[in-house]
Image (cartoon, rainbow, N blue to C red):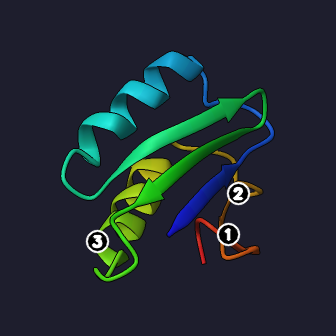
Amino acid sequence: MELIIRYTALPEGLTLDMVRDDLAGLLEDDGWLTGSGPDFIELELEDEKANPKYGILTVKNYLQKARFAPDTAIELAGTPVGIYE
């Protein structure tokens, strides 16, 4: 399952490389990074046969703890969901 993180700015003190490294470490068993840009990070969560909920919860929890802005969203199957919802 593809998950895209859409953000307008990184939290103070974090770089894109730092966020990508953090997510890669957290998702070691549940997914992997597939791309990134100035306003998005793209991830693949497990394969289609496994339940990706642990990967989704891991990503949301990381984004909240890192204090990403409230307008940050994760997009699953083309549907954006706010990280604080």
Residue bearing mark 2: 70
Q: Nearer the viewer, mark 1 or mark 3?
A: 3
- Disc 3: CA contacts within 10 A as few (<14), some (14-19) or many (>=20): some
Earlier in the chain: of badge 1 and badge 3, it is 3
Describe the element under mark 1 as helix, strand or loop.
strand
38 versus 79 height, above or below: above
Q: Position of residue 83 (x, y in %)?
A: 59, 65
Tell me which amino acid carries mark 1.
Answer: Gly
64 versus 18 height, above or below: below
Q: Quadrant of residue 45?
A: bottom left
Q: Residue furthest left?
A: 29
Tell me which amino acid carries mark 2.
Answer: Pro
Residue bearing mark 3: 54
Side of 15 where 51 appears, left or right? left
Q: Quadrant of residue 32?
A: top left
Tell me which amino acid carries mark 3.
Answer: Tyr
Q: Are marks 2 and 3 in contact (CB under 8 Å)?
A: no
Residue bearing mark 1: 82
Quadrant showing the C terminus:
bottom right
